Image (cartoon, helix red, strand yellow):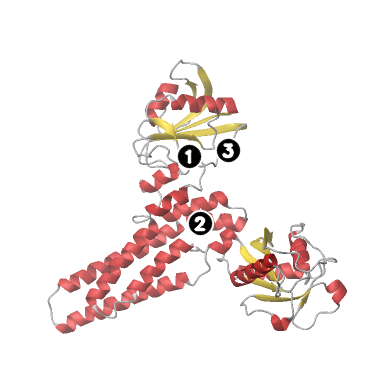
C-alpha cells in the first residue's frame, strides 16, 4: 500500500498522538518528481537516520549519503541528508530531512524503511506545524497564516497570508501583551499601596485612561477590513425578478455556462456560486432565483434562498426596477438586456450579455467596490477568531470606570484573551480543525 502524501484525513479512532513519538512524512508533492523531500521530527529522528545512512553530518550541512534498509541492508537510494538540532529546527525537535529521487518506488521504499525503525510513525495532517506551535517556534496566528498560504489562489491572498505566516500579527500581539502586563503590574502595586487619597486617585485615573487608550487602539484594528473577504472571495449577488437576465449576466462575467438560461420564468430554483477573479480581486459571483410570489413549493424555496443571499451580499447587482431595489451599502443598479431594451435611464449601468456591452465597466465597478472590503496592500487583517478575542479584550478594558480593582480585573481578562489569540492557552478545541487543513508532511 502506498504511503505517499495526500490531503486525506486519518481514520477515526486512530492512535493517540504523543510528543514522545517521532513522526515522518513526505513533505513535497506527490511523485513522480525530480526530487522528493521526506522529513522526520522527534527524539528518535537521529537514531533512525544513522540506522539508514550511518554517521550524520554536522547540523545544517547537506551531505550526499547512501540510504539502506535497516532490516536487510539493501540500498534504497542516494540522497542529500540534512540534520537540524533542537530547539533550532522548524518543529523545535530534532529533525532530519532527506532529499531523494522522486519516483514512487523510491519514496515508498524510504517510508517503509522508516516504519521499521523503533519509535517512528507516519505523521498526521499538520502534525509538524502543530509541534512547532507546541514548542514555541510559531504562535497560533502564524499557523493560521501558514494554512492560508497553503490554500492561496491569488497573488493578493498569497501576500496577505505570507505577512501573517511570517509573524506580522505575532509581533503586534507581543507588544500589546507587554503593555497589558505592565499596566497590570502597576494596577496591582497601586491596590497594595497605602497612601493618601490624592495619590491613589491619581493612580486610578491614570491607569484607567491608559487602559481605555489601549482599548481604543484595539477598536481601530477591529474597524479595518477583515481577512475573510480576501480568503473566501467578496460575495457579489445578482438579484431581481424572473427573466431579468441574471443567469445570462453571471455566465457572461464568468465566461462560462454555469447557470441555465431559458425564456421560462422561474428557471433558476437555487443559488449558484461561481468563484472568479475580477481585475485580480477574488469574488464569488452568485446567481439567484427570480424574486416573485409563487405557489410552486420548489420555486418558493429558491426565492427564500435568494433573499438570504441578498442579505449576505457584499456587493449587490440589482436587475429589477430601480424603485424595488433593496437597501444596500454597495448597490449597483443595472439596465440588463440593453441590446433589446434600449438606452438606460439615468443612474443605471447598461449591460448586455449578448453583445458584451457594459461588461468591462461592470467588472471594474465590482472590483472597485470589492476592494473597499479588502485589506490594503501590506496591511494585516484579522480573521473572525482573532477579531473575537480582540473584541473581548477591548470590552473588558472599557469596563473599569475609574475603579482600580475593576481596572485590574479588566487587564487580567484582557491578558487571557490575548493568550487565546496567540495560542498560549484555551484553544485546544480548535486546533484539530486548523491542522486538519494541512497535508501529512506539513
Percent coordinates x, y for residue 309 in the rendering: 62, 68
From the top left corner, tell me how far across and down residue 372 is, in percent: 60, 71
Measured along the vertical axis of the image, is residue 229 above or below residue 64?
below
On the picture, is 85 further left or further right than 82? left
Task: Provide the secondary structure element on which disc 3 rests.
Answer: loop
Check disc 2 and report the residue beneath it: 163
**Could you say which is closer to the camera, residue 97 or residue 252?**
252
- Distance from Cα at disc 2 to Cα at disc 1: 34 Å
Q: Earlier in the sequence, mark 3 or mark 1?
A: 1
Image-quadrant location for residue 43: top left
Q: Earlier in the sequence, mark 2 or mark 1?
A: 1
Return the residue at label 1.
11
Q: Secondary structure at mark 1?
A: loop
> Which residue: 56% across, 66% down?
376
Question: On screen, 401 above or below 214?
Answer: below
User: Crowding at label 1, few (<14), some or many (≥20) Cα neighbours within 10 Å?
Assistant: few
Q: Which residue is mark 3?
A: 29
- Mark 3 to mark 1 CA distance (whole Å): 22 Å
State whether residue 152 appears in this view: yes
Amino acid at each position: 500500500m502506498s504511503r505517499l502524501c495526500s490531503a486525506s484525513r486519518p481514520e477515526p479512532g486512530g492512535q493517540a498522538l504523543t510528543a514522545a513519538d517521532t513522526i515522518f512524512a513526505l513533505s513535497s508533492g506527490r511523485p513522480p518528481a525530480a526530487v522528493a523531500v521526506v522529513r522526520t521530527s522527534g527524539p528518535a529522528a537521529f537514531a533512525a537516520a544513522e540506522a539508514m545512512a550511518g554517521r550524520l553530518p554536522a547540523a545544517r550541512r547537506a551531505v550526499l549519503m547512501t540510504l539502506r534498509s535497516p532490516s536487510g541492508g539493501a540500498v534504497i537510494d542516494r540522497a542529500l541528508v540534512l540534520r537540524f538540532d533542537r530547539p533550532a529546527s522548524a518543529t523545535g525537535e530534532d529533525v532530519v530531512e532527506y532529499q531523494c529521487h522522486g519516483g514512487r518506488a523510491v519514496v515508498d521504499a524510504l517510508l517503509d524503511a522508516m516504519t521499521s525503525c523503533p519509535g517512528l510513525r507516519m505523521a498526521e495532517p499538520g502534525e509538524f506545524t502543530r509541534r512547532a506551535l507546541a514548542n514555541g517556534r510559531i504562535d497560533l496566528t502564524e499557523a493560521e497564516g501558514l494554512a492560508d498560504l497553503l490554500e492561496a489562489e491569488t497573488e493578493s491572498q498569497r501576500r496577505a497570508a505570507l505577512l501573517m505566516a511570517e509573524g506580522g500579527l505575532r509581533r503586534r500581539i507581543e507588544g500589546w501583551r507587554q503593555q497589558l502586563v505592565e499596566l497590570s503590574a502597576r494596577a496591582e502595586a497601586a491596590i497594595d499601596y497605602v497612601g493618601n487619597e490624592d495619590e491613589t486617585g491619581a493612580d486610578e485615573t491614570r491607569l484607567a485612561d491608559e487602559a481605555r487608550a489601549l482599548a481604543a487602539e484595539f477598536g481601530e484594528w477591529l474597524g479595518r477590513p477583515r481577512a475573510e473577504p480576501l480568503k473566501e472571495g467578496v460575495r457579489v449577488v445578482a438579484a431581481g425578478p424572473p427573466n431579468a437576465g441574471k443567469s445570462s449576466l453571471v455566465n457572461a462575467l464568468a465566461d462560462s455556462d454555469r447557470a441555465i438560461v431559458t425564456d421560462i420564468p422561474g428557471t433558476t430554483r437555487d443559488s449558484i456560486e461561481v468563484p472568479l477573479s475580477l481585475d485580480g480581486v477574488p469574488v464569488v459571483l452568485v446567481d439567484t432565483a427570480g424574486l416573485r410570489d409563487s405557489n410552486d413549493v420548489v420555486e418558493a424555496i429558491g426565492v427564500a434562498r435568494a433573499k438570504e443571499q441578498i442579505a449576505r451580499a457584499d456587493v449587490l447587482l440589482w436587475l429589477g426596477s430601480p424603485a424595488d431595489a433593496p437597501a444596500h451599502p454597495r448597490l449597483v443598479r443595472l439596465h440588463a438586456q440593453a441590446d433589446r431594451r434600449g438606452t438606460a435611464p439615468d443612474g443605471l449601468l447598461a449591460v448586455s450579455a449578448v453583445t458584451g456591452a457594459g461588461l468591462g465597466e461592470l467588472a471594474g465597478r465590482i472590483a472597485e467596490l470589492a476592494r473597499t472590503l479588502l485589506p490594503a496592500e501590506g496591511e494585516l487583517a484579522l480573521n473572525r477568531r482573532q477579531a473575537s478575542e480582540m473584541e473581548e479584550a477591548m470590552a473588558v478594558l472599557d469596563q473599569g470606570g475609574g475603579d482600580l480593582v475593576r481596572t485590574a480585573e479588566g487587564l487580567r481578562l484582557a491578558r487571557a484573551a490575548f493568550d487565546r489569540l496567540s495560542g498560549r492557552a484555551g484553544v485546544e478545541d480548535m486546533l484539530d480543525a486548523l491542522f486538519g487543513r494541512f497535508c501529512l508532511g506539513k
